[in-house]
Image (tube, rainbow, N blue to C red):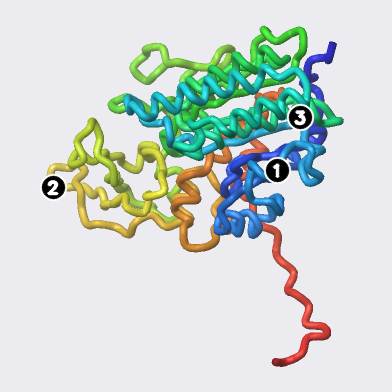
Amino acid sequence: MTPELDPSHQAARFRIVDLFAGPGGLDIAATIMGVESIGVEWDDATRATRDAAGLLTTKEKDVAALGPCDAQVEDANVLTGGPPCQSFSVAGNRKGHKALEDVKRLATCLVAAQDAASFATVWAAVQADPALAEDERTGLVLQPLRWIMEAKLSRRRKAYEVVVLEQVPTVLPVWKHYAELLRKIGYAAEAHVLHAEAFGVPQTRRRAVLIAQYAPGNETRDVGFPTPTHQRYRKGVERLSAGGTGGLRSDGSLFAAPPLAGKIEPWVSMQDALGASRPQDFVMISNYGSGGDPKNRGRRTSLEPAATITGKCRRNRLFLLKEGESGAKEVGEELDRLSFEEAGLLQSFPERYPWQSTDVAQQIGNAIPPRLSLHILCSALRLGRPGEDMFDKLAAWEPEPRTAPSDQGATDV
């Protein structure tokens, strides 16, 4: 029987391969932790950002064209990823429901294989399934499971010790199904929705997260998920006082504190994150409507976390909040819209993250917040809670200065 992962193991023993890696929300967290990681990313602009940040990226762009036995990634013992799930992520959509059922059906087929030869046969049949012809993204959702099975059945270094998958909350049924399947092949696995602001990210963003740990013979044991460190945001709820309140809200009622935690901190506000560039109070009006009404734009003041930062974050409008004659705050003149650096800060990226190319807003909006990644990875790798030193390093992180190319031997044209 393979022993369970030892919490005393140091981060350096892990090596991550990150599928659909994006600009590096998870990889920069791994860097802070001292865990080596390499990402697989399709988009050239996003790859340019990763390169400027000094993050490793595979030469091959396509997740489907690589596998766990390829030389660049064969030493990885941790698999992470956030496959595109738009094909079934719209609640109540008939096509989305069908795509969801197709993924669950095909995923079940994949884990039935007992050896490399039978898996190759099953995978060929899955690829020929009509459901994948309807929407290629359905096939991309199956890629992490393909990597998991190929590592377990074909790779000399055996199964991935840890798997972490994340996506929007409507993908939770897929992750729950994956967890059931992974328990059948030797993993302890669970899936839950995490709230980013409950981990110190200055925005309300929910992510469905699956964590699986290889534990043959002990698949039913609990899988530790990160416990909140900060207050959840709810409209109309008062912000906790600085330093936390021992699990009680300011009105004396019980707040959902993490087990065994002595206190939780107040949510991190936009003002906390952007104070250097925006010292005055402001209100942000969302580009999106709420409650099904496109005219009902969501509003958050600078003392609240931002709404979810999306690829259209530059369309959010900001207005000064100033004191009126009555002493109440009133909406004043319109301010400059969020810069890329500010949008990155609201995602908990370092201030000097080297965003590249022309689609930066989309890169930022698609990323997983690095601060949330720190909590998820520390729990998944059983390394305990991330210390404040990690968050300090994340905030202060800067890309390594690049050495100017030598002009030795160059000739004028």
SS at mark 1? loop
Q: Indicate left or right for 368 with 266 as reference.
A: right
Any part of residue 178 in sight: yes
Residue 122: percent from the left, percent from the top?
66, 25
Residue 144's place in the image compared with 252, above or below, is below
Q: Which residue is drawn at 41% across and 31% down?
A: 89
Q: Name the residue under label 3.
A: 151
Q: Quadrant of the N terminus?
A: top right
Residue designated by label 2: 325
Q: For the view shown, which residue lies furthest in the left direction?
A: 325
Q: Do the residues labelled 3 and 2 touch (CB within 8 Å)?
A: no
Image location (x, y in percent) of residue 320: 26, 52
Q: Which residue is drawn at 72% across and 42% down?
A: 37
- N-terminal of the two: label 1 or label 2? 1
Q: What element carries label 2?
A: loop
278 left or right of 349 in image: left
Q: Tell me the distance, in whole angstroms, between the alpha carbons under discs 3 and 2.
A: 68 Å
How far is disc 1 from disc 2 in space, using C-alphas? 64 Å
| Relative vertical location of residue 309 with respect to residue 162 in this rendering, above or below | below
Residue toward you, 73 or 281: 73
Q: What kind of element bears circle 3?
A: helix
The residue pinned by badge 1 equals 66
- Say whether residue 239 is visible: no
**Within 10 angstroms of label 2, few (less than 14), some, or many (20 or more) residues?**
few
Please tell me which of labels 3 and 1 falls first in the chain: 1
Of the pair 397 and 278, the residue shown nearer to us: 397
Q: What residue type is labelled 2?
A: Glu
Give the residue type at disc 3.
Ala
- Give the Cα distance between marks 3 and 1: 12 Å
Q: Which residue is drawn at 39% across and 18% down?
A: 249
Which quadrant of the figure has residue 327? top left
The kind of residue on which mark 1 rests is: Leu
